[in-house]
Amino acid sequence: MNAPLRKAGVVIFVLFGLLFANLNWVQAYKADAYRTNDHNGRVRVAEYKIPRGVIEVDGQAVAESKATDDTYKYLRTYPKKQVYAPILGYKGVNLAETGIERSENEFLSGASDKLFADRVSAMFTGDQSGGGNVVLSIKPKAQETAWKQMTNNERGVEKGSAVAIDPRTGAIQAMVSMPSYDPNPLASHDTEAAAAAYKKLNEDKGKPLLNRATSETYPPGSTFKVIVSAAALKAGKTQSSEIQAGSEYVAPGSGAPIHNAEAETCPGSQVTLKEALTESCNTGFARLGVELGADKIKKEAQDWGFEQDDLTVGDLSDGGGLSVAASRTGAIQNPDGTTDQAALAQSSIGQKDVRMTTMQGALMAATVANGGKQMRPYLVQQQLSPDRRPIYNANPKELRTPISSDVATDLKEMMFSVVKNGTGQRAQIDGYEVGGKTGTAQNAEGADPHGWFIGFAFNDKGEAVSAVCVMLENVSGGHASAEAARISGLIMKAAAGGGGD
């Protein structure tokens, strides 16, 4: 064989080798990815041949599949429309799943290994197999109260979010984001109509597709004073310790004074730590933060969950679910690495670069109510087989313990005082002892401030029945946190079984 033919033979042999290797790569390693690809039409048709499992709350279906006579045999429907959309997401024919529909997709579709026995049984019996059912931890009364009160708030606010948690377990009792959307058009079998509906929602300046409770961070304002209080208590201060206050404070290196929200708030040169939290004394906490130092403030916030990038809220068994954006304190330093004292003072009252999610705010309140233990939040309470046989039951897990029980007790008493005597009085509800912390946060220049409330409720047996965070964006008319406090009380009352308005 001459040299040119030999070279050609080697090239052809190498090409056949590469083709063989690629074929094996596709079959052995990429088959599943191609099989489950959102653009694989055959897979979509096959997937819709069986009924997708129900997502339910307290026996009520909030996502279910109904039989049709078209190519896709079952249509996904959402009877509560906007109320649960930020949690459920949607399951579209030509759109990728979102929310719980995505994180629980394998189980809902029936493809999960947990349902292998059910699939085998269906093969032998000839019965039609179906998807597994998912039971959420949401309490319908709490969810519907949160939705009604948020969307019909007394201040005309159009954007905001709310989260309620059982402090003892981490079970999410309510999660609302507004504005929301109706997922039904996105699940339509008319793919062109579904794509048009998605395009309209995606281009909406109100960002209705965004779950503000988990995905957006905002300056938390005075709710952050709970963390500064915890750092002070750990450093040896008590509820009755006197801290410096006054009508204004200029931090070292700053020309801009920090004032209190009202002239009558802690005008004296000193105030107790408990009084400072009760009255939401800006000058006192700004001075306190500078006294404690940036490292202690940042470390305390981190202990409570700030800076965590991998938190999800969904299924405790595999860690899947809705991703939660990380809350941040910011660097609080000058370009040369030294502490920026002015930034530290502002950060200590929840301003400057401090950012927090509504979920983080609810976790903070839940931690205090639960004696210092922060439970991992979750949404999936149960997984049931197609014939409703229990496959999985949530087993609550501790996420972290940022504070001791003694510090938690001090904070609890201080937060009770906020609601009984201070800025959070609108959160009071009959039959429950409520504690909390208000927050009014400045944001964009010229924009109305955000209104916050984080809090908890104890029943007459001394049990922590609910912890909540309500965040309202750009509240006009002053006292931005008052409406958040009012709504929080009603959500907690509904979550505790006391009904809602």
Image (tube, rainbow, N blue to C red):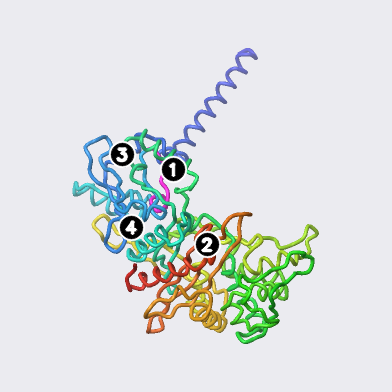
| Residue count near mark 1 (Cα–Cα under 10 Å), binned few <14, some 14–19, many ≥20 | some
Q: Which mark is residue 201?
A: 1
Q: Nearest to the eye among marks 2 and 4: give it.
A: 2
The quarter of the displayed image where residue 192 is located: top left
Give the residue type that dot 4 points to.
Answer: Val
Q: Nearest to the eye among marks 1 and 2: give it.
A: 2
Check the picture and name the quadrant holding the C terminus.
bottom left
Name the residue: 65% across, 60% down: 353
Across and down, in percent, residue 462 comes to: 41, 83
Q: Mark 1 to mark 2: distance in Å?
A: 30 Å
- The relative height of residue 130 versus residue 438 in the rendered view (above or below) is above
| Residue count near mark 2 (Cα–Cα under 10 Å), binned few <14, some 14–19, many ≥20 | few
Give the residue type that dot 3 points to.
Answer: Ala
Residue indicated by mark 4: 134
- The span shown in magenta is 94-104
The quarter of the displayed image where residue 390 is located: bottom left
Residue indicated by mark 3: 46
Across and down, in percent, residue 96 comes to: 42, 42
Mark 2 or 4, nearer chain start = 4
Of helix, strand and loop, which one carries label 3? Answer: helix
Check the picture and name the quadrant holding the N terminus.
top right
Mark 2 or 3, nearer chain start = 3
Residue indicated by mark 2: 477
Give the residue type that dot 1 points to.
Answer: Leu
Of helix, strand and loop, which one carries label 1? Answer: helix
Check residue 362 for magenta coloring.
no
